[in-house]
Image: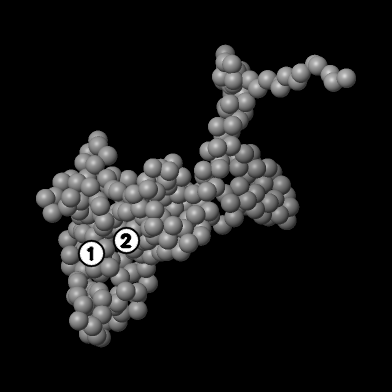
């Protein structure tokens, strides 16, 4: 047992100790050279000049301090001028909240601390959409809110249950495009989800589709695709309710007509493939029978 214990201790002995012993056994100049080799080896093992337990490593990283809501409220006030001329409206917001948007972070970085007004003009933006944007910054949502567990929005006596004009759809569509401009993905997703909660009519849907194809990019399929799918599956019934508006929309935005037609043809092709793979009983086409009589 003693032999095995000593053998174990010998095997577990640090390499540096063995190397040091070798240095002591070396004579003269060879000792200093060997010592240099030992020092170099130790430095290499420890990763250059860094100490093996140097402070400031990845395990010592501390999370960034939480920004309190009070800090937002004590940040400078920024004035937002919405509209122009007689229709101009003044809104205000704390800069700490505005700079959550990359767009406003860049705009606010241009301000100076010399006492000049912190002011940004938006002559072409919709006032209601800007109000929804600011409401979202302060509360995390905007009116009307979604009812939990349902595909509906909270009720308001001033808002009809059915969107006959498209105003309710356009409200959320404008918030969507504003969120896209300001770089707020959460607000963009929220507005998109509320669009699908609106009960609208054919004319309301056409007004909404016109706005979408006018103010969103061709590659923005997250909002364009549902519009095209809606009309591809319902155009044969809804077109009669607003045939003139539907025709005008197709002529004004050919991409809309193309997107709808593409989905209609894709659906038709899909049905034909399913019919070939799963033919209904008795639906097989028969070869036409010809009379076997011949004329003299």
SS of the residue at dot 1?
Answer: helix
* Secondary structure at numbered mark 2: helix
- Looking at marks 1 and 2 on the same chain, the residue that comes earlier in the sequence is marked by 1
Residue drawn 23% across the image and 47% down it: 162
Q: Residues within 10 Å of mark 1 (few under 14, many from 20)?
A: few
Q: Nearer the viewer, residue 49 or 83?
A: 83
- Residue at the (84%, 19%) spot, across then down: 294
The residue located at (60%, 40%) in the rendering is 17
Alpha carbon distance from label 1 to label 2 = 9 Å
Can you see residue 226?
Answer: no
User: Where is mark 2, residue-wise?
Assistant: 174
Indicate how the structure is coloured in the image.
one colour
What residue is shown at x 43% (from left), y 43% (from top)?
236
Q: Locate the C terminus and report the quarter of the image it occupies.
A: top right
Foreground residue among 56 and 277: 277
Q: Is 265 located above or below residue 139 in the figure?
A: above
Residue 146 image offset from top left, x and y in percent: 23, 45
The answer to whether the residues at label 1 and label 2 have Cβ atoms under 8 Å apart is yes
Q: Position of residue 96 (x, y in %)?
A: 26, 66
Left/right placement of residue 97 relative to residue 36 reads left
- Which mark is on residue 128? 1
Single out the residue that lies furthest toward the top. 1
Which image quadrant for residue 230? top left
């Amino acid at each position: 047992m003693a032999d095995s214990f000593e053998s174990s201790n010998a095997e577990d002995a640090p390499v540096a100790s063995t190397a040091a012993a070798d240095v002591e056994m070396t004579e003269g100049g060879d000792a200093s050279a060997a010592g240099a080799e030992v020092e170099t080896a130790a430095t290499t093992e420890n990763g250059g000049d860094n100490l093996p337990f140097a402070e400031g490593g990845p395990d010592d990283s501390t999370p960034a301090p939480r920004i309190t809501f009070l800090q937002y409220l004590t940040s400078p006030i920024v004035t937002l001028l919405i509209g122009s001329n007689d229709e101009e409206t003044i809104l205000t917001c704390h800069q700490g909240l505005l700079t959550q948007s990359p767009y406003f972070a860049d705009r606010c970085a241009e301000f100076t601390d010399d006492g000049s007004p912190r002011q940004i003009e938006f002559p072409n933006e919709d006032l209601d959409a800007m109000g929804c944007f600011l409401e979202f910054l302060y509360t995390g949502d905007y009116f009307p809110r979604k009812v939990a567990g349902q595909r509906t929005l909270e009720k308001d006596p001033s808002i009809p249950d059915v969107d006959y004009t498209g105003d309710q759809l356009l409200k959320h569509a404008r918030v969507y495009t504003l969120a896209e401009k300001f770089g707020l993905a959460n607000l963009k997703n929220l507005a998109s989800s509320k669009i699908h909660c609106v009960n609208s009519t054919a004319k309301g849907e056409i007004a909404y589709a016109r706005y979408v194809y006018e103010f969103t990019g061709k590659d923005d399929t997250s909002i364009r695709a549902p519009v095209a799918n809606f009309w591809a599956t319902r155009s044969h019934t809804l077109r009669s309710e607003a045939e003139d508006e539907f025709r005008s929309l197709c002529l004004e935005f050919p991409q809309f007509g193309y997107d709808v037609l593409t989905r209609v043809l894709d659906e038709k092709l899909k049905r034909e493939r399913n019919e070939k793979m799963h033919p209904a009983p008795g639906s097989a086409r028969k070869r036409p029978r010809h009379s076997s009589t011949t004329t003299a």
